[in-house]
Image (cartoon, grey):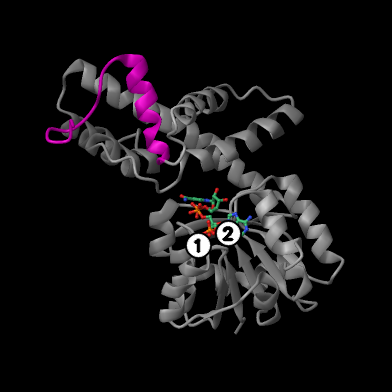
Amino acid sequence: MERVGFIGLGIMGRPMAINLLRAGFPLTVWNRTPTKTQALVSEGASAASSPRELAERSTVIITIVTDAPDVEEVVLGPQGVVHGAKSGSVVIDMSTISPRATREIAARLAQHGVHMLDAPVTGGEVGAQQGTLSIMVGGERAVFERCLPVFQALGKRITYIGGSGAGQTAKLVNQIIVAGTLLAVCEGLLFAARSGVDLQATLDAVSGGAAQSWQLENQAPRILRGDFAPGFMVKLMQKDLRIVLDVGRELALSLLATGQVHQLFRALEAQGLGQEGTQALMKVVEALGGARARLPGHEG
Ligand code: NAP
């Protein structure tokens, strides 16, 4: 059985690390803010004092931090994984970062005989908690197959996409679809509110038909309750959409819906709301429409 090291115990990483422990993997954890390791240690993990030390104890090292500079810091930095990892070990980066940065980090690791898979996820905090994430993987197929038992502890749909960076590209496709869908959910709810129909009845009806989606199922109820706490923060979505639009520019692609949602989220960031969940997109849509969509008892 692989000895797993886990770096980044944030909204996603913490429940994912717990699922690895429950699946029986010997687990070492490291987090930049050390207090966050305590909950994992009390469940049976051991804590390392640096990514380097964590890598010395592990055969598979998972990172789920924020963006490319953060992955570079924990993997290639002065106390990074690369200085402790044995030849033949695997780094699995589950953060969402650019495909190009992924390929560069993979090339640096390869110089030390360390494999790398890019394995970004979708399914949100709920998927991380329930072990039902969808995981899209880039890198060598043989390395992917070796790591399958680790992925199976974290997710339900695990898909090999192609070579290094292909997992991140698939994740960008996911984010394009999520962004457009979320805006459509917000517009639909506001339309319902302005029209004066029963919001809950309307949501129940449309959830059972062709409009069904993860965004509708998970985000619409939160919006209608006025719950804007983050499962996925606006500022992280903005990071992802920035990467999408950068790659789109390189590909000479017009990404109309994605560009609009990126601008709407910028308005939220300008109001200091970048730490709210992405469902807070509704606040901008409501401001534009001059109305609110809340269930009775949640108007406050
Ligand atoms: P989060 O709650 O903000 O957690 C970020 C984690 O990364 C924290 O453990 C943080 O450490 C660590 N970190 C950030 N920069 C670091 C650095 N330079 N050095 C060391 N550690 C660093 O974010 P999250 O929601 O878990 O998201 C993590 C990644 O998953 C992101 O790439 C995000 O886009 C992706 N993702 C998120 C979701 C979601 O629904 N939340 C879904 C799919 C994918 P501290 O504790 O010290 O701050």
Between disc 1 and disc 2, whose residue precedes? 1
The quarter of the displayed image where residue 224 is located: top left
The answer to whether any part of residue 104 appears in the image is yes
- Mark 2 CB within 8 Å of ligand 1: yes
The quarter of the displayed image where residue 252 is located: top right
11 relative position to 96: left or right: left
Residue at the far left in the pictured view: 297
For the magenta stretch, what is the residue range? 276-300
In the rendered image of this protein, does residue 79 appear above or below residue 239? below
Q: Residue at x 47, y 78 (%)?
A: 21
Q: Which SS class for mark 1?
A: helix
Residue 270 colored in magenta in the image = no
Residue 64, numbered circle: 2
Residue 13, numbered circle: 1
Position of the N terminus, as image quadrant, is bottom right
Q: CA distance from mark 1 to mark 2?
A: 6 Å
Which is more toward the observer, 226 or 181?
226
Q: Residue at x 37, y 22 (%)?
A: 285
Residue 296 colored in magenta in the image = yes
The answer to whether any part of residue 213 appears in the image is no
Tell me the amino acid under the disc marked 2: Ile
Q: Residue at x 65, y 71 (%)?
A: 61
Q: Position of residue 42 (x, y in %)?
A: 41, 80
- Mark 1 CB within 8 Å of ligand 1: yes
In the rendered image of this protein, does residue 68 appear above or below residue 40? above
Q: Which SS class for mark 2?
A: loop
Q: Position of residue 71 (x, y in %)?
A: 67, 56
